[in-house]
Image: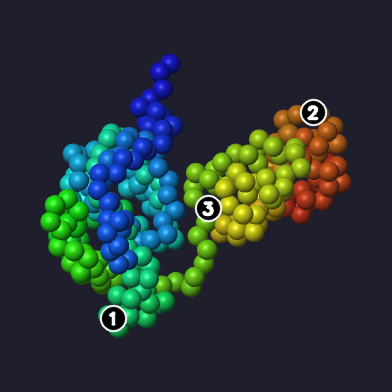
Amino acid sequence: MQPSAELFIRDREVDFQIRRSSRDRLWTGLVATIYDASSGVDETLFTSHCVSMHLGPPVGITTRCNGAVSRRLQIPGDVKIIPAGFSRIWEVEAPTTKLSLNLSPTLVQSAAADMGMKPDCVAIVPQLHVRDAHIEHIAWAIKAELETSAPLGRLYADCLALALAAHLLRRYGQAAQPSRPAGLPRRRLQRVLDHIGEHLADDLTLAELATIANVSPSHFKVLFKKSLGVPVHEYVIRTRVDYAIDLLLHDDAALSEIALRAGFANQSHMALHMRRLTGKTPSALRKE
């Protein structure tokens, strides 16, 4: 059986080839890049406010961010906005070309202050697909500045960057919620959950799970709880109880063996947590 095109895309990472970049031009608070991207999947945690505009031919693109999903055929001028601190998963069906405009949080905060806003009290809301004539006008101007052999210089680019930041705040800003850490990106979280499920009988460690998530142990504890609403140790216990219940109902093994297979230290350990979470003992559940 041949794998589907979707599965093939999901297994490939996007390959990026930069055409033009402003990194060596010392623009204030803005890094602009024109790049070609292959088909595949890319997952990025943004440290700056990213505004990207589609430049290439129409192509099917799926974007996931902050629990929202956008699947559509993108055409030149389509815009996506991912604020700093957000993770984005991007699936592209065919090679394409993009313009990426990355605004530093410092620049956006400065623009907010100039507009009479309290920088800490306003946040930019993610936009997975918009048509915005104002952003498009600024983006095409920046693209032209990158590609011309006679650039207008840093002052011109700085003015465009501030204009873009002000527009983002005015059009897509909202009152900021109390600061809370973002959860783990979906794919990393799934890798952790898969590992837990496959190694329930093992003596799992925080460092082991944090390594799979590619973050520090202390950071992992916070991100995991933010993602699922429970501490990682409690999630593991609940998963072990669920697995033990399944064994109790479908396997004739002794309770002591089931406890070990589910990752509990012994039968009493399993009974303690099973009673806590279900109100019933393993023996009672098996009888039922």
Name the kind of residue labelled 1 in the image.
Answer: Asp
Residue under the image location 31 percent in, 53 percent down: 128
Residue under the image location 81 percent in, 37 percent down: 260
Query: Is residue 191 visible in the rendered structure shown here?
Result: yes
Q: Mark 3 highlights which residue? A: 184
Q: Mark 2 highlights which residue? A: 252
Name the kind of residue labelled 2 in the image.
Answer: Asp
Could you tell me which secondary element the residue under label 2 belongs to? loop
Image side of residue 177 versus residue 208, left or right: left
Which image quarter holds the C terminus? top right
Residue under the image location 40 percent in, 46 percent down: 89
Rendered location of residue 62, percent (x, y):
33, 43
Position of residue 282 relative to residue 88, above or below, is above
Q: Residue furthest top?
A: 1
Rendered location of residue 36, percent (x, y):
27, 40
Name the kind of residue labelled 3 in the image.
Answer: Leu
Position of residue 3 relative to residue 39, above or below, is above
Q: Which mark is residue 114?
A: 1
Q: Are marks 1 and 2 in contact (CB under 8 Å)?
A: no
Foreground label between 1 and 2: 1
Could you tell me which secondary element the residue under label 1 belongs to? helix
Residue under the image location 40 percent in, 42 percent down: 42
Query: Is residue 288 visible in the rendered structure shown here?
Result: no
Which comes before the other along the chain, label 1 or label 2?
1
Q: Quadrant of residue 139?
A: bottom left
Between 213 and 249, the residue placed more toward the observer is 213
Mark 3 → mark 1, Cα distance in angstroms: 34 Å
